[in-house]
């Protein structure tokens, strides 16, 4: 175990590096801290118009008519668009691949501007472009819409009932893609089955079960959505936007507008957080249509309320889990029933939840039923390890209960049943080398877990979570400068410091310093296709592309060295930043040789493009949470919190720690504070950060981190990806800690003070009343 | 021969309840064609005929790895093939 920076590192690998594992200053740091970095709202163009979006005040309503004439006549208004201005998809079931999953074009389009029905409060129905923001706002008030208000269904169990309001006319349930023909708000259902769960439970000597409910929560990025569009007279379209994937935005916008992909250029600005919520496009198509109509560029920037009410939160859910163990305390059967609110349109991550629910442990028999249910809320989208946090809350509670009943330490009980290389998940897939066991061993052996926690109303909880991580496509281009530095253009939006983590992998490969590399994020016209920044994939896949680009540069520079020495290239080799002849008679450094590239053939440009077909390494995260409950208010104070995560090789440990801490804080928000509060009419009542409580530094101790490095054999440098798994276990760890502190078992997120106080009052009315 | 893990919702309809079946094939496409020959109904559930590719909402896993190569992905006699819901991350 080594200690550096904010946390500790436990390395299970056997390779040493010069650049990887160090903590260089981030390349974009100065611009970020001095305010020079350009975000979407900063974009200014000649003749820029300001766009505003009118949103439905109703959770569920049929749109009878829209009259924009008064708005269009307001001085300063240049154009008004509605859903009728967007092309109608040729086929209503046409799908596009957003890199991390498919989406139906019609649903994307209808979510951008509603046509026949408004499906949630905040659903965009019209947009205005004007010479000033205030004129545009005033124009919105002049748009007259005749709504037929319909009853809403805003929670998953209500919406699943046969007599629930039908949200989409004619929607039928599909079972793994097969249409059942049964009309329902259940858009899809799936079953995973491993072994014989009935026989497993029949053999169980002990079982435990729970039903939990999780709230709708938002990704909570600080920067609201934005987009600026310029539709040129030649029919091409340029978009500046805050997005997790320029190419994914390009595909969506082109599909929604009926354009060829090559006619759309997307320039990603700096991004103020995404967490999955900035994969979909919201305002860009409307801005584009307004630009097309006016011939001027149009910028739309959402307000915070727009962002809460009109963009993708994570699904609320109901999860039921039952687990059985045999007489030896080994897991023998697990059953789960998982229903997710997809929001207004189908396509939520319940499938991933089903694959995660039993992923941490070795279950010989498992049965998982999952349901994708539409409700009158914003269309849910990915949020950091989508689906995993919901199910970890349920499973880990049951694991704790079983440990208590068995009289076992909760960490040891988990270790007794932990998934390892060769374990078959409930969806049937067999694990490669993984680090779940190592994470729990690090927890067990940590100073935190061994330390005593004393005092009334205090408790400790542990929990474990999982996320798959993905590979996907990435591209990098590297141009060697004559001073030996390298311009590195990569296609991944930099959300968490990935410019630097990618540059470090490039530098390591060539034996250069990270500071010799000048990384930048390209757009759809300046770099090769690259999938979204998501799925914990960028340091893994784009880093791999950088490795390939460095190999390409190395090969070209070997040829240049051979030209300089007037020998064959096969007589030259490269080691540790220098080229040398194989007989050792000559040597030249990378930088010195770079000064000769103009005389030896001109530019040296390397490139790397990858689409890893194998080698993606999943990641596990474990928490230790110490809390104290105020019995007078039910408020939970976090005394100490440790996050342990398997990172594979931690390229830049500070950024890995940042991901672990950030994910943990978001998970703590799910656990204690965050939720969409809805009125009976389906109106969000807390669409500001004042009322939607994300944890702040005043609510938290420093999140301690222990990076576990179990190298991923499927990556040149052992990278797994670390962006997501850390959000999964915190609610479960907090729940266990609360139960251990005051004896109440909460099954609904968030575990708000009033819920804890109510539970305390019910369990021990005398002591609570006495204070 | 490669072993195909049949998705639970398809077992009763396509394979008489069998959770795993063995069929011949050196690529995912050949495996699906072999499945179709023996258990009709697989092809339409997996392949987008218009695009001649695996349907967008389905992911193919070969030996534990989600394959981007789709129908062209090579399989060996010892391979396990799974058809899973396509999923997304954040």
Image: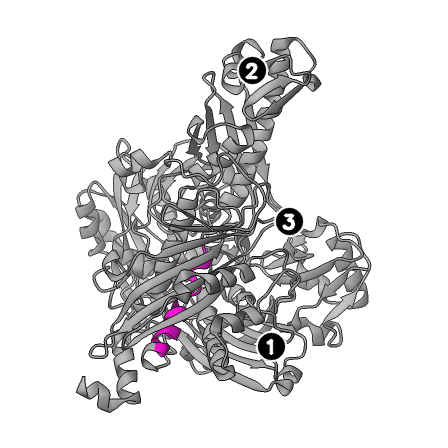
Q: For residue A582, which quarter of the picture?
A: top right
Q: CA distance from mark 3 to mark 1?
A: 31 Å
Tag of residue A330:
1
Above or below A43: residue A622: below
Question: Which numbered marker is on residue A588?
Answer: 2
Q: Nearer the viewer, residue B61 or A321?
A: A321
Q: Residues within 10 Å of mark 2 (few under 14, many from 20)?
A: some
Question: In what element is the residue under mark 3?
Answer: loop
> Which stretch appears magenta?
A724-740
Q: Nearer the viewer, mark 3 or mark 1?
A: 1
**Chain under disc 1:** A
Mark 3 surroundings: few (<14), some (14-19) or many (≥20) residues within 10 A: some
Instruction: Name the residue: 58% across, 79% down.
Output: A329
Q: Position of residue A31 (x, y in %)?
A: 30, 34
Q: Could you say whether the residue bearing mark 2 is in a helix, strand or loop?
A: strand
Circle 3 residue: A614
Same chain letter for marks 3 and 1: yes
- How much space separates mark 3 and mark 2, taking CA atoms? 37 Å
**Nearest the eye: A766 or A265:** A766
Question: Which quarter of the figure is the C terminus of chain A placed in?
Answer: bottom left
Asked if A446 appears above or below A406 in the picture, the reply is above
Chain under callout 2: A
Horizontal and vertical percent position of residue A55: 29, 59
Q: Nearer the viewer, residue A715 or A218?
A: A715
């Amino acid at each position: 175990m080594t200690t550096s920076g904010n946390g500790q590192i436990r390395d299970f690998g056997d390779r040493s590096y010069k650049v990887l594992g160090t903590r260089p200053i981030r390349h974009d740091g100065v611009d970020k801290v001095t305010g020079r970095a350009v975000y979407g709202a900063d974009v200014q163009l000649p003749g820029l118009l300001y766009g505003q979006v009118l949103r439905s005040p109703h959770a569920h309503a049929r749109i009878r008519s829209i009259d924009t004439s008064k708005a269009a006549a307001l001085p300063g208004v240049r154009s008004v668009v509605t859903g009728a201005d967007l092309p109608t998809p040729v086929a209503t079931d046409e799908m596009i691949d957003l890199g991390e999953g498919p989406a139906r074009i019609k649903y994307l389009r209808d979510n951008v501007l509603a046509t026949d029905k408004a499906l949630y409060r905040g659903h965009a129905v019209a947009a205005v472009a004007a010479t000033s923001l205030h004129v545009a706002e005033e124009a919105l008030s002049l748009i007259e819409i005749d709504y037929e208000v319909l009853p809403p269904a805003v929670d998953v169990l209500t919406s699943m009932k046969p007599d629930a309001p039908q949200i989409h006319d004619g929607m039928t349930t599909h079972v793994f893609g097969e249409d059942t023909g049964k009309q329902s708000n259940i858009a899809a259902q799936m079953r995973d089955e491993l072994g014989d769960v009935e026989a497993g439970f029949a053999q169980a000597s002990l079982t435990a079960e729970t039903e939990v409910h999780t709230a709708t929560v938002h990704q909570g990025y600080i920067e609201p959505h934005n987009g600026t569009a310029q539709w040129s007279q030649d029919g091409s379209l340029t978009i500046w936007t805050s997005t997790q994937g320029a190419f994914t935005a390009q595909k969506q916008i082109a599909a929604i507008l009926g354009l060829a992909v090559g006619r759309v250029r997307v320039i990603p600005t700096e991004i103020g957080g995404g967490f999955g919520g900035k994969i979909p496009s919201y305002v860009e198509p409307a801005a584009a249509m307004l630009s097309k109509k006016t011939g001027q560029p149009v910028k739309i920037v959402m307000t915070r309320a727009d962002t809460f009410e009109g963009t993708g939160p994570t699904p609320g859910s109901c999860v039921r889990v039952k687990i059985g163990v045999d007489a030896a305390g080994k897991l023998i059967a697990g059953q789960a029933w998982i229903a997710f609110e997809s929001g207004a349109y189908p396509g939520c991550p319940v499938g991933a939840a089903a694959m995660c629910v039993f992923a941490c442990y070795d279950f010989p028999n498992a049965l998982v039923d999952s349901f994708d249910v539409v409700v009158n809320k914003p269309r849910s989208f990915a949020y950091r390890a989508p689906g995993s946090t919901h199910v970890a809350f349920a499973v880990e509670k049951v694991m704790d209960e079983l440990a208590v009943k068995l009289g076992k330490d909760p960490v040891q009980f988990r270790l007794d049943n932990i998934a390892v290389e060769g374990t078959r998940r409930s969806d049937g897939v067999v694990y490669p080398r993984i680090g779940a066991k190592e994470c729990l061993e690090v927890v067990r052996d940590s100073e935190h877990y061994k330390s005593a926690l004393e005092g009334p109303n205090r408790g400790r909880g542990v929990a474990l979570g999982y996320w798959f991580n993905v590979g996907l496509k990435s591209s990098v281009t590297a141009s060697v400068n004559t001073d030996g530095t390298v311009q590195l253009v990569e296609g991944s939006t930099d959300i968490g410091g990935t410019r630097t983590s990618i540059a470090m992998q490039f530098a390591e490969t060539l034996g250069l310093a990270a500071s010799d590399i000048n990384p930048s994020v390209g757009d759809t016209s300046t770099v090769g296709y690259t999938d979204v920044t998501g799925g914990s994939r960028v340091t893994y896949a784009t880093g791999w592309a950088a490795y390939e680009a460095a190999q390409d540069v190395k090969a070209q520079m070997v040829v240049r060295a051979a030209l300089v020495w007037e020998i064959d290239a096969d007589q030259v080799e490269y080691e540790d930043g220098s080229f040398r002849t194989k007989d050792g008679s000559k040597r030249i450094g990378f930088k010195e040789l770079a000064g000769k590239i103009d005389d030896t053939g001109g530019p040296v440009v390397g490139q790397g493009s990858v689409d890893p077909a194998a080698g993606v390494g999943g990641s596990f995260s474990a928490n230790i949470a110490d809390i104290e409950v105020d019995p007078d208010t039910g408020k939970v104070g976090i005394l100490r919190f440790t996050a342990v995560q398997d990172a594979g090789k931690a390229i830049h440990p500070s950024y890995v720690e940042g991901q672990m801490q950030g994910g943990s804080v978001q998970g703590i928000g799910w656990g204690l504070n965050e939720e969409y509060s809805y009125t009976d009419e389906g109106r969000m009542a807390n669409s500001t950060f004042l009322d939607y409580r994300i944890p702040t530094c005043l609510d938290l101790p420093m999140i301690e981190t222990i990076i576990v490095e179990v190298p991923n054999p499927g990556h040149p440098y052992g990278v797994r990806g670390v962006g997501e798994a850390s959000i999964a276990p915190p609610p479960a760890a907090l729940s266990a800690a609360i139960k251990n502190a005051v004896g109440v078992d909460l099954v609904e997120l968030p575990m708000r003070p009033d819920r804890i106080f109510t539970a305390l009052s019910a369990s021990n009315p005398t002591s609570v009343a006495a204070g | 021969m490669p072993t195909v893990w049949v998705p639970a919702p398809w077992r009763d309809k396509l394979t008489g309840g069998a959770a795993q079946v063995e069929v011949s094939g050196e690529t995912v496409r050949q495996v699906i064609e072999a499945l179709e020959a023996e258990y009709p109904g697989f092809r339409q559930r997996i392949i987008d005929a218009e695009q001649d590719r695996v349907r967008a909402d389905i992911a193919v896993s070969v030996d534990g790895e989600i394959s981007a190569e789709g129908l062209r992905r090579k399989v060996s006699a010892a391979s396990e093939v799974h058809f899973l819901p396509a999923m997304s991350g954040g």
